[in-house]
Image: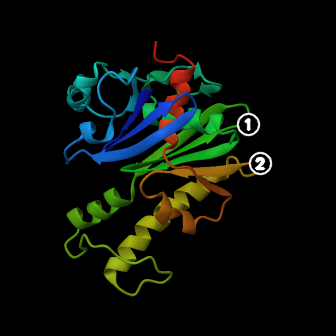
Amino acid sequence: MILLLDVGNTRLKWGLREADQWLAQGAFAHDEAWVFDVVLPPPGQIDGVFGASVVSPALRHRVAESLAPWGHAPQWLTPTREACGVRNSYVNPAQLGADRWAALIGAQDHGAAPCLVVTAGTATTIDVLDAEGVFRGGLIAPGVDLMRRALAGNTAQLPLADGRVIDLPTCTADAITMGCLHAQAGAIERMYRHVADLPGASCLLNGGAAAQIAPLLGVPLRIIDNLVLDGVAVAQRHGCFR
């Protein structure tokens, strides 16, 4: 049994996997206690810890300390030029975020290429994976909550409030919510043009804001929860953590 991690900017997602099966998955916010003793089997039953991380060394150290009783230091995925059937077109492959790399590997393993791989979290990443498994490039944009907080923090009269999902907002809270969601959907649909004419193309959407954005998209769509964890599992199976 192995423990797989996706350590993002606001949450740590975890999954327990045995062979090709997920046994359990869950998440902890960074600002709450990580009660691994409640969700994990006792020490001695986990054979290794593997993850993708986009956080600071200090937060990685917190992860390692929290999991120390299980006796395995986390091994972290490093993007390379090629792995698991995916080729990385970044000028410097190691500068690609490990979460984006894992999501691309997960998408390829799901047989989704050609596709647009979208992770809608604290930041929204929108990446093009072609039919040959080549990551052609992509975008990074503020996520929905970051957009809302930016408006609240940098304007005099726009509040940080939860609005409704509604076609034509007639109050400020709704207007902010829909403005941020449409900004996400618009960026995704513009990037989808890069794969739209390829046979079988689709958009793979995951992340905390996926359910909010999905109804606004007018492109072929699949929501795959925890796509990054799927990619970490594939990378571990292929020996990418050596």
Q: Which quadrant does the N terminus fall into?
A: top left
Residue 142 in the image: above or below residue 18: below
Describe the colour scheme in one phrase: rainbow
Seen at 48% across and 32% down, the residue is 17
In front of the other: 51 or 92: 51
Is disc 1 in contact with disc 2, using a CB cutoff of under 8 Å?
A: yes
Tell me: 31 left or right of 6: left
Helix, strand or loop under label 2? loop
In front of the other: 149 or 29: 29
Residue 64 in the image: above or below residue 216: above
Q: Residues within 10 Å of mark 1 (few under 14, many from 20)?
A: some
- Tell me residue 173's x, y (percent): 32, 78
Seen at 68% across and 31% down, the residue is 133
Quarter where residue 58 is shown:
top left
Seen at 44% across and 42% down, the residue is 24
Tell me: 53 left or right of 92: left
* Residue underneath mark 1: 131
Q: Residues within 10 Å of mark 2 (few under 14, many from 20)?
A: few
- Tell me residue 96's x, y (percent): 46, 30
Q: Earlier in the sequence, mark 1 or mark 2?
A: 1
Quarter where residue 156 is shown:
bottom left
* Residue underneath mark 2: 200
Residue 120 is at least partly visible in this image: yes
Looking at numbered disc 2 in the image, what kind of residue is underneath it?
A: Gly
